[in-house]
Image (spheres, coloured by chain):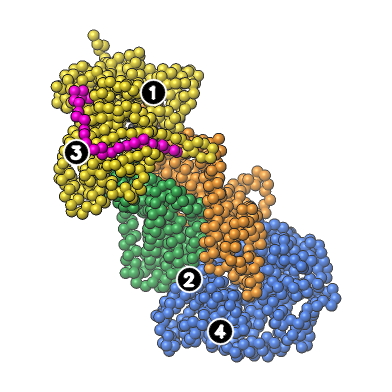
């Protein structure tokens, strides 16, 4: 028995893109409904048009993007025909929105209390005192500590999770009937993400709100969705109840997405790699000191604290841990991109720590790196050919030889030979990451450090790149240090996993062991926070 | 505590910079052809060797260079800026007599250009793409491209000679004997043309800067948040965009404050404004080194001070600064 | 070439370019258009504009052709503008790159040095330099360069500082490229667009500065420049307005054109800042 | 004659701002202009160069021309109330000016035997040998009388009184706001009864020439001294209603403008080249177009307003063909010479003149490079003889021995000063004639010698005489009696008044 007017009804919505884009419509013929008290998840790859619908509902589309057809009915009233003033009255009151990036979404020059109170102020709600009280109430409600003093803080003083809670408090201030959340947890740690998801679910239940939740993470969908809409290139390819879509996906695109969701492979236990240790790290220490002056003590961060491990040829070590735990710093130390405060890094028995940059340079070719961001790690002004030959040329390889090698590598990582003369911006993220891998391989390294090398990619692309890396590693017998914050990914590809917490390795072992029988409390917490743990994507597409 | 520490650090740095400027200029000036004695002899309309030698000895110019530099620095550190060769008056007196005029002129030009520039920039950004925007930006471009002295000449021609609204030069009505409020009004009246002349170029700069900064901030996420909250456009501009957009304008302005003093050389010349810009130029032409060095020292100190004050204000306006260090 | 297309979409920038092309052509063609030196008196002194069709912009008090002066002045103004900017950019890029790339003490030292120059008002400094080295085209150009490099150095430093930590630079370190090579081939090409934009505006400022120096009597007396023409005729503004108005307009138009070009470059090079008309 | 009205304020311009007002230490134009109201000379000179009384009321020259006796005015008081006496004159002549004043030092050391004051109101100068120009050495700029009680025994240049000068003149120093104005007020104790008429004098500092014209036009100032505004402004302003102009008042100085070349260097060591250059320059054009008619082409090194002027000299009318011919004769190849032309940094008209000269020299085939310098650079280059050709001018000071000879005497080839024989001209006959004329007791004898000298110098083309400056004083009609003597506005303005 459903009420006749749904909370939200998107009806045949199309939004045209300006000329010069790769497709004509940002979203095309979109139709779905959201009822009060329901969580509707919109999933799909980057650029599929998820945010566009949300922005259209809020009337936040840039002025040059206009819905060309369709209706958006909120409680039966068409938002697309409302004037800006009317819309402004609805925003924040009947429908609220929270965004992905919690730092940039808050005004840096206003205290969080002011920003929350502003919602009530602009909607003419209450007086100064009642608003103040409400702010305190809200801050408390979203679980922020010490609301009385926190409301006078500026956003930059709050952690990411806290900021996102402020955003939620702001969205809830007038108890709207509907909440739109555009990837609200993507920028957060798994543990924080779990808390925020929990918070949203709790509020949604308590207030009976309708929630439109945008995400690209099927794990999140599995945890919270009542209904799911799957989008691809501006079109809805599949929609239905969460159970249907997750466990009985029909459309090939949905199936492909679900298949790509990383999932620890419990069965596979890998053969312990034998042979000479390639890299031995002993009691590595790295402390950052910053600020500090005549009267203040400098801020001291022990980013790497007494870390030791051994890596053999052909072995993959996964380093996991939450943001700021020191993973990247560890990688940077090994590659001598930063100096080390203590300990040893023995590469083939030779300690790298005391070497000068100049003395180390000839050895660099053996230790290579694949970077996180496929967009930022390729020089936008160089052709792919140049990017791939720079390294060998710097190491004394003649140009023609380097060029030949570069072309071979393109084939090896599955790129068209024509890529050689093109520039990075002409490639997709996944393709660029392949270039990044080819660049690292151009020097025939023995050790590869991959720092979050797939985090910036969409799940399906991520799966392809991971496959490629595993493949190449087997083929070339390279040792890999695989840094990631995603335990699921690490468990899928690594021989060993080391869990870092505040600069120290708190637990290490084979993936199955770490995953199934975590010993350290922190690891346990980490694993518990993984979204969608109870859902097995493998079974869904089997 | 943190602010105090910051202040001490910055003052030390400022002192260092000012000292550097003085040494740099001292050495630079030594490269000039002709020395003050020769100029004075030339001015006197006569002069023989004995006359010039007398002057040189009196000014200490017969000493080796490093001795001159050391004794100059020593004097400066003890607060003595030396004696003007030409005017035979302590440099500090000379500068102090003329500094207020320049501070008044540059200060009001600074305020004028900053306020007007920000207002126009905000208007242009708010009405982006409209006729008003185009008019403001075209105007800004034209004032940006017009030589300052040209504006000055035209302004005098139009407003003093043809319309007879404003006095064409001087800082006050000389010999009128105004006191109190009447004097203030009299000076204000005289201040209009030079201020506008000196300020127009910078008004253009700030207008463009403000507009660009506003547009940039308007694209930031938190503006979208504010819209999503239902904040009306006017309030978004005032409460969210403006404050964030103005900070870079202020930073830029505080760095530019010194440039106004440079522009004052021209303005003071055209408007017979008794400030230190003109003093500097005359001192340069007459090789009156102590005065020249003194003016540079004082302007450097003023510039450094303005920057320091700006930084301090910044710390109050922008809560993020303190941790950023 | 999407850059050219983006640039071409900007009407103002195209107008600016067109004007500048005309100015450059006039400058180049000056000796052909006016084979006699612009310093040579050719007509009756103080002819008003259009009084004699041979001298459409009139003559000055020595009977020199104003039109010829403007044509030759274009050469000097552009020359001073471009060379001084080039020198300033070279100094600024060199110091800024070193400071930004190496950071730490190098950065501290270089930035303190830059501060010395920034603390002295630029125009005052230029006046002193020109007076000291006696006014001629070299000293004027160098003086303008010396006072204009600090902003470039700061800009380049900032760019290098932020680019230095970018992943593609780290990648170059990891593959074993040396510092200088990284600066020259990896970072500089990526910092070039703000430098070009700044440089284009500096050309305009340099032309204005030259004219202001000339106004104070610190111009090169052998080079007919616009600033010199105004400076020389400013006191005759009311007797013979055409002597200073035409060169004044020439400065205004040229500086305006260069500005429009600079803004066009800026918009074309930073697509995300592109203002869309709605 | 009208009866003077007492009271009123006279507004004038001091341009450029004087370094100080102490006339004994600085003899720049504006210093004399302002300082002339505070200090006074021993004598003054009429527009016809007749000697007039000032602080000396009477004077007597002995037959042999060796003893000069001056009787000073009675009842004169310094501005600080101390009485003025002959002792002050002796101090001024024997100590102060001998030490601080180059021109006086030369005269004193060359000619004076002793200076004494036999009684409180007489001063006696005894000369070593006759010096016919001696009586012309006592006007304000050559012999300002300074107070002994203030300067004797103290360092002249750093004396605090230089900042608040004490003289005997009709006006007292009141205030000097640097960069703005100098304010003088009536000296109530002035020694001429019933004078001065005016209450206050303001000298304004207006650095820009255009603004100065505006100042006069708007009535902010009542008087423009020669050089305060540019030539074409003079033309415009003098046509305004209620404005009077005069070229009087410069007879004592009669500035004469010339090109000064370095005769030590090629091509100026060649007399034919110098003659050619003279023929190549149209002095009429310069006077008419660059100076707007405010001058008179010069034919001789002596100004035509002075006593010993002679027009029986070698002349060089404008004739380019002749000039080119002379160059050809001289054997000099002009294209091989790049001549550095250093204009005197005194304003735009001088610059225009440099451009004109450049243009003419280039027509002869020389390459000319204008080297702009500021005052410091100019003095230095000229003093060090580091120049090819420049402009300069000389004041005549009433007698050739004072203002003219210094530029031609070979004894005056002294490095280190810009106002000597910097061109390096040497002609023993000229030296001798100048000496003879200066020592002549008989005026006719002097006249003959000077005529001879003018002939010789013009034939040698020692300098390139261009024109005699005619400075114009512009004033409102209401300003009365301003220019009365040969030193013009530098004269004490005790008898100046403003009509109501
Ligand atoms: N401001 C804009 N101007 C022009 N086109 C845009 C704009 N924003 C998005 N698009 C285009 O609209 C399409 C849909 O974008 P949208 O932001 O909705 O994707 P998304 O699914 O939210 O992706 P993501 O997961 O990366 O956030 C894309 O092709 C994108 O390039
Ligand atoms: N250059 C630096 N200066 C000072 N502190 C730093 C610097 N780089 C990192 N840190 C600090 O060191 C700690 C570890 O940082 P690191 O980048 O290694 O973390 P991470 O595990 O890679 O985190 P993420 O998952 O966010 O990439 C953090 O607290 C960080 O703030
Ligand atoms: Mg999105
Ligand atoms: Mg990291």
Discs 2, 1: same chain: no
- Residue B110: % across, % down: 52, 46
Any mark on residue A165, and which? 1
Q: Answer with left or right where residue D75 lies relative to residue B303.
A: right
The one of D228 and A43 positioned closer to us in this rendering: A43
| Left or right placement of residue B245 versus residue B91 in this view | left
Query: Are labels 2 and 4 on one chain?
Result: yes
**Label 4 sits on residue:** D425
Q: Which label was assigned to residue D183?
A: none
Q: Which chain is yellow?
A: A
Reading the chain from its start, which is encountered first: label 2 or label 4? 2
Q: In front: mark 2 or mark 1?
A: 1
Magenta residues, start to end? A264-290
Q: CA distance from mark 2 to mark 4?
A: 23 Å
**Residue D25 forms part of the magenta stretch:** no
Q: Are the residues under marks 1 and 3 on the same chain?
A: yes
Quadrant showing the N terminus of chain D = bottom right
Most distant residue in the right direction: D119
Q: Are marks 2 and 4 in contact (CB under 8 Å)?
A: no
Task: From the image, state the color of chain D.
Answer: blue
SS at circle 3? loop
Mark 4 surroundings: few (<14), some (14-19) or many (≥20) residues within 10 A? many
Can residue A459 be seen here? no
Residue position for label 2: D371
* Residue B82, quarter of the rendered image: bottom right
**Chain name for mark 2:** D
Question: Please, which residue is most extreme toward the top here?
Answer: A1
Task: Indicate the quadrant containing the C terminus of chain D: top left, top right, bottom left or bottom right.
Answer: bottom right
Find disc 3 in the rendering and name its residue. A477
Structural crowding at the residue carrying mark 2, measured as other residues with C-alpha within 10 Å and reported as few (<14), some (14–19) or many (≥20): many
């Amino acid at each position: 028995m459903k009420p006749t007017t749904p909370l939200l009804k998107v009806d045949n919505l199309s939004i045209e893109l300006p000329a010069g884009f790769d497709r004509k419509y940002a979203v095309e013929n979109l139709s779905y409904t959201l009822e009060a008290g329901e969580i509707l998840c919109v999933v799909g790859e980057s650029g599929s048009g998820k945010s566009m619908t949300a922005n259209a509902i809020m009337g936040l589309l840039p002025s040059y993007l206009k819905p060309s057809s369709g209706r958006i009915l909120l409680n039966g009233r068409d938002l697309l025909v409302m004037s800006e003033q009317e819309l402004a009255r609805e925003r924040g009151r009947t429908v609220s929105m929270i965004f992905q990036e919690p730092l940039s979404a808050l005004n840096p020059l206003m205290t969080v209390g002011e920003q929350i109170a502003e919602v009530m102020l602009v909607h003419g709600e209450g007086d100064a005192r009642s608003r103040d009280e409400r702010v305190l109430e809200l801050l408390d409600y979203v679980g922020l500590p010490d609301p009385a003093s926190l409301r006078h803080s500026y956003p930059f003083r709050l952690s990411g999770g806290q900021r996102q809670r402020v955003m939620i408090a702001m969205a809830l201030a007038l108890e709207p009937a509907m909440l739109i959340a555009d990837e609200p947890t993507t920028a957060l740690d798994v543990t924080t993400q779990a808390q925020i998801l929990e918070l949203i679910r709790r509020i949604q239940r308590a207030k009976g709100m309708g929630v439109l939740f945008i995400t690209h993470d099927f794990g999140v969908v599995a945890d919270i969705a009542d209904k799911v809409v799957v989008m691809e290139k501006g079109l809805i390819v599949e929609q239905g109840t969460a159970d249907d879509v997750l466990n009985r996906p029909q459309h090939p695109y949905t199936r492909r997405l679900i298949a790509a969701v990383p999932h620890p492979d419990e069965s596979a236990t890998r053969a312990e790699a034998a042979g000479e240790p390639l890299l031995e790290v002993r009691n590595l220490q790295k402390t950052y000191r910053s600020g500090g002056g005549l009267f203040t003590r400098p801020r001291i961060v022990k980013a790497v604290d007494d870390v030791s491990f051994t890596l053999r040829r052909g072995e993959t070590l996964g380093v996991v841990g939450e943001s700021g735990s020191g993973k990247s710093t560890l990688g940077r130390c090994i590659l001598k991109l930063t100096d080390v405060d203590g300990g040893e890094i023995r590469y083939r028995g030779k300690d790298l720590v005391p070497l000068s940059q100049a003395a180390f340079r000839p050895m660099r070719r053996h230790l290579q790196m694949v970077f996180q961001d496929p967009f930022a790690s390729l020089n936008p002004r160089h052709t792919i050919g140049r990017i791939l030959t720079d390294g060998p040329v710097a190491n004394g390889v003649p140009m023609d030889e380097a060029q030949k090698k570069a072309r071979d590598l393109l084939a090896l990582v599955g790129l068209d030979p024509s890529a050689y003369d093109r520039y990075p911006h002409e490639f997709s993220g996944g393709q660029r990451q392949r270039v990044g891998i080819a660049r690292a391989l151009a020097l025939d390294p023995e050790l590869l450090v991959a720092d979050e090398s797939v985090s910036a990619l969409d799940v399906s692309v991520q799966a392809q790149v991971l496959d490629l890396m595993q493949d190449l590693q087997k083929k070339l017998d390279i040792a890999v240090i695989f840094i990631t914050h995603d335990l699921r990914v690490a468990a899928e590809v690594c021989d060993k996993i080391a869990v870092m917490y505040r600069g120290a390795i708190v637990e290490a072992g084979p993936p199955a062991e770490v995953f199934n029988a975590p010993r350290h409390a922190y690891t346990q917490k980490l694993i518990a926070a993984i979204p969608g743990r109870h859902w097995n994507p493998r079974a869904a597409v089997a | 505590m943190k602010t105090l520490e910051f202040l001490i650090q910055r003052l030390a740095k400022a002192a260092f910079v000012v000292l550097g400027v003085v040494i740099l200029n001292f050495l630079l000036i030594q490269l000039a052809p002709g020395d003050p004695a020769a100029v004075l002899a030339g001015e006197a309309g006569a002069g023989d060797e004995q006359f010039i030698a007398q002057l040189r000895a009196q000014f200490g110019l017969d000493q080796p260079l490093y001795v001159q530099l050391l004794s100059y620095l020593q004097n400066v550190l003890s607060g003595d800026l030396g004696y003007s060769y030409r005017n035979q008056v302590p440099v500090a007196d000379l500068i102090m007599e003329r500094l207020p005029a320049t501070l008044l002129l540059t200060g009001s030009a600074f305020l004028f250009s900053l306020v007007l520039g920000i207002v126009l920039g905000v208007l242009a950004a708010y009405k982006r793409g409209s006729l008003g925007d185009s008019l403001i930006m075209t105007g800004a471009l034209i004032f940006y491209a017009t030589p300052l002295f040209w504006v000055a000449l035209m302004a005098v021609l139009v407003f003093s000679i043809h319309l007879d609204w404003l006095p064409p030069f001087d800082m006050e009505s000389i010999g009128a004997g105004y006191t109190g409020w009447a004097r203030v009004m009299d000076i204000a009246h005289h201040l209009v043309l030079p201020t506008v002349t000196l300020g127009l170029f910078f008004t253009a700069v700030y207008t463009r800067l403000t507009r660009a900064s506003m547009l940039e901030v308007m694209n930031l996420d938190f503006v979208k948040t504010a819209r999503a909250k239902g904040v009306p456009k006017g309030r978004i501009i005032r409460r969210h965009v403006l404050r964030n957009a103005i900070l870079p304008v202020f930073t830029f302005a505080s760095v530019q404050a010194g440039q106004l003093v440079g522009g004052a050389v021209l303005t003071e010349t055209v408007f017979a404004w008794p400030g230190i810009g003109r003093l500097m130029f005359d001192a340069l032409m007459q090789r009156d080194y102590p005065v020249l060095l003194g003016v540079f020292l004082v302007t450097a100190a003023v510039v450094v001070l303005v920057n320091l004050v700006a930084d301090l204000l910044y710390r109050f306006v922008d809560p993020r600064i303190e941790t950023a260090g | 070439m999407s850059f050219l297309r983006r640039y071409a979409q900007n009407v103002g920038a195209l107008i600016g370019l067109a004007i500048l092309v005309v100015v450059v052509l006039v400058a180049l063609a000056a000796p052909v258009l006016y084979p006699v030196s612009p310093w040579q008196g050719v007509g009756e002194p103080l002819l008003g504009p259009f009084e004699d069709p041979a001298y459409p912009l009139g003559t000055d008090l020595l009977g020199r052709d104003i039109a010829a002066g403007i044509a030759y002045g274009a050469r000097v103004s552009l020359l001073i503008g471009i060379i001084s900017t080039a020198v300033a950019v070279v100094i600024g890029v060199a110091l800024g790159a070193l400071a930004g790339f190496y950071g730490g003490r190098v950065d501290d030292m270089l930035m303190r040095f830059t501060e010395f120059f920034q603390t002295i008002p630029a125009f005052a400094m230029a006046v002193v330099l020109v007076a000291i080295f006696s006014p001629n085209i070299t000293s004027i150009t160098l003086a303008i360069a010396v006072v204009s490099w600090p902003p470039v150095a700061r800009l380049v430093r900032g760019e290098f500082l932020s680019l230095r930590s970018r992943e593609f630079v780290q990648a170059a370190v990891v593959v074993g490229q040396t510092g200088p090579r990284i600066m020259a081939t990896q970072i500089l090409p990526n910092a070039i667009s703000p430098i070009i934009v700044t440089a284009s505006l500096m050309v305009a400022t340099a032309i204005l500065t030259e004219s202001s120096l000339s106004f104070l009597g610190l111009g090169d007396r052998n080079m007919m420049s616009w600033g010199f023409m105004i400076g020389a005729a400013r006191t005759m503004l009311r007797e013979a307005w055409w002597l200073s108005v035409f060169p004044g307009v020439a400065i205004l138009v040229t500086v305006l054109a260069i500005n429009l070009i600079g803004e066009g470059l800026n918009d074309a090079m930073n697509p995300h800042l592109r203002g869309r008309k709605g | 004659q009208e009866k003077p009205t007492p009271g009123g304020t006279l507004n004038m311009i001091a341009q450029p701002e004087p370094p100080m007002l102490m006339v004994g230490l600085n003899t720049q134009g504006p210093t004399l202009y302002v300082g002339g109201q505070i200090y006074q000379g021993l004598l003054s000179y009429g527009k016809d160069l007749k000697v007039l009384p000032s602080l000396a009321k009477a004077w007597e020259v002995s037959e042999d021309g060796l003893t000069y006796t001056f009787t000073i005015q009675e009842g004169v008081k310094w501005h600080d109330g101390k009485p003025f006496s002959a002792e002050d004159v002796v101090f001024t002549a024997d100590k102060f000016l001998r030490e601080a004043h180059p021109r006086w030092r030369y005269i004193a050391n060359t000619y004076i035997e002793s200076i004494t004051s036999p009684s409180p109101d007489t001063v006696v100068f005894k000369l070593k040998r006759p010096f016919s120009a001696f009586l012309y050495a006592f006007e304000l700029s050559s012999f300002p009388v300074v107070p002994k009680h203030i300067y004797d025994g103290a360092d002249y240049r750093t004396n605090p009184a230089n900042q608040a000068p004490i003289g005997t003149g009709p006006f007292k120093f009141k205030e000097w706001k640097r960069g703005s104005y100098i304010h003088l007020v009536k000296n109530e104790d002035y020694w001429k009864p019933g004078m001065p008429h005016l209450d206050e004098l303001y000298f304004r500092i207006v650095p820009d020439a255009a603004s100065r014209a505006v100042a006069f036009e708007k009535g902010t100032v009542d008087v423009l001294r020669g050089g305060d505004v540019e030539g074409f402004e003079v033309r415009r302003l003098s046509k305004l209603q209620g404005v009077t102009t005069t070229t009087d008042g410069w007879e004592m100085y009669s500035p004469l403008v010339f090109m000064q070349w370095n005769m030590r260097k090629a091509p100026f060591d060649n007399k034919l080249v110098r003659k050619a250059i003279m023929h190549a320059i149209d002095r009429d054009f310069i006077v008419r177009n660059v100076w707007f008619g405010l001058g008179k082409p010069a034919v001789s090194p002596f100004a035509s307003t002075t006593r010993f002027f002679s027009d029986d000299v070698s002349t060089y009318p404008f004739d380019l063909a002749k000039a080119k011919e002379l160059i050809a004769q001289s054997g000099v190849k002009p294209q091989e010479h790049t001549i550095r032309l250093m204009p005197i940094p005194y304003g735009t008209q001088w610059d225009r003149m440099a451009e004109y000269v450049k243009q003419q020299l280039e027509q002869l085939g020389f390459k000319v490079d204008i080297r702009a310098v500021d005052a410091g650079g100019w003095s230095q280059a000229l003093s060090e003889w580091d120049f090819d050709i420049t402009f300069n001018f000389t004041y005549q000071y009433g007698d050739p021995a004072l203002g003219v000879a210094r530029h031609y005497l070979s004894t005056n080839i002294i490095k280190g000063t810009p106002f000597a024989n910097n061109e390096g001209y040497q002609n023993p006959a000229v030296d001798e004639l100048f000496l003879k004329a200066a020592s002549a007791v008989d005026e006719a004898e002097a006249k003959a010698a000077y005529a001879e000298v003018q002939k010789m110098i013009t034939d040698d083309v020692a300098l390139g005489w261009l024109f005699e400056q005619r400075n114009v004083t512009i004033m409102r009609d209401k300003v009365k009696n301003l220019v009365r003597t040969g030193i013009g506005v530098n004269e004490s303005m005790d008898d100046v008044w403003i009509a109501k």
